[in-house]
Amino acid sequence: MADPKFIYVLLTDTGTMFTRLIKRYTAAPYNHASIALDVDLKEVYSFGRKCATNPWSAGFVEEDIHEGVYRHFPSTRCVVLRLKVTTEQREVLQKKILFYKKNKERYKYNLLGLFFLAMKRSYAPKHAYFCSQFVAELIRGMDLELWNRSSALVTPHDFLIHPDFEVIYEGMLYDYPLFCANHHIQELQFS
């Protein structure tokens, strides 16, 4: 269910080898960031794996909570954050996401940017993002200046500790109340 007053950021920890490596370095509880247009997590976007079993095939992704990476890693932990926005800001975000969807083949994963981030240096080539860089850039594109630094220096943990974000859920992804309620409704419809 979309609420024009809010957008959502989903932070996750799937427990993959790659995310365990990142977690060992950052010591942060979550290492992947996605942006969602609805509290039900039906419209979720990020830069990450295109295929659950291949971490090297990555880029712009429409994440499906029921399929793909999350289905492959059912023990995913998450936190759902809410950010208040204006109707105009939300419309700008929707247009930007539509642009990425239409042009997704032009975009690559900014793997090198993660190494620069570890050295606290910004590396932001055109048409390449890592997850938190992408989400921060989308938010910046709505004329929300949440950090006084490059989007390529924003980590998933920065969303969690920013005072403008409200935690509305934290726990196992598949225990998320709205996910559980929607999944139950879908099961009833197909029974």
Image (cartoon, rainbow, N blue to C red):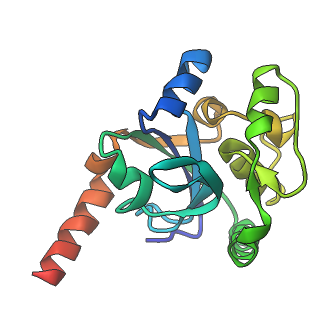
> Which residue is drawn at the image coordinates 58% and 70% (left, top)?
4
From the viewer's side, name the closer residue of 152 and 168.
152
Measured as percent of width and height from the top left, residue 86 is found at 70, 65
Q: Quadrant of the N terminus?
A: bottom left
Measured as percent of width and height from the top left, residue 152 is found at 81, 39
Answer with left or right where residue 120 lies relative to residue 181: right
Answer with left or right where residue 133 lies relative to residue 28: right
Asked if one can make out residue 84 in the rendered structure from this viewpoint, the answer is no
Residue furthest to the left: 191
Q: Quadrant of the C terminus?
A: bottom left
> Which residue is drawn at the image coordinates 30% and 39% (left, top)?
75
Asked if one can make out residue 103 in the rendered structure from this viewpoint, the answer is yes
Measured as percent of width and height from the top left, residue 90 is found at 68, 68
Residue 160 image-quadrant placement: top right
From the viewer's side, name the closer residue of 34 and 140.
34
> Which residue is drawn at the image coordinates 24% and 58% (left, top)?
180
From the viewer's side, name the closer residue of 9 and 16.
16
Compared to residue 177, the image places residue 73 above or below, namely above
Residue 66 image-quadrant placement: bottom left
> Which residue is drawn at the image coordinates 66% and 31% (left, top)?
158
Residue 100 image-quadrant placement: bottom right
Measured as percent of width and height from the top left, residue 137 is found at 79, 51
Q: How many marks?
A: 0
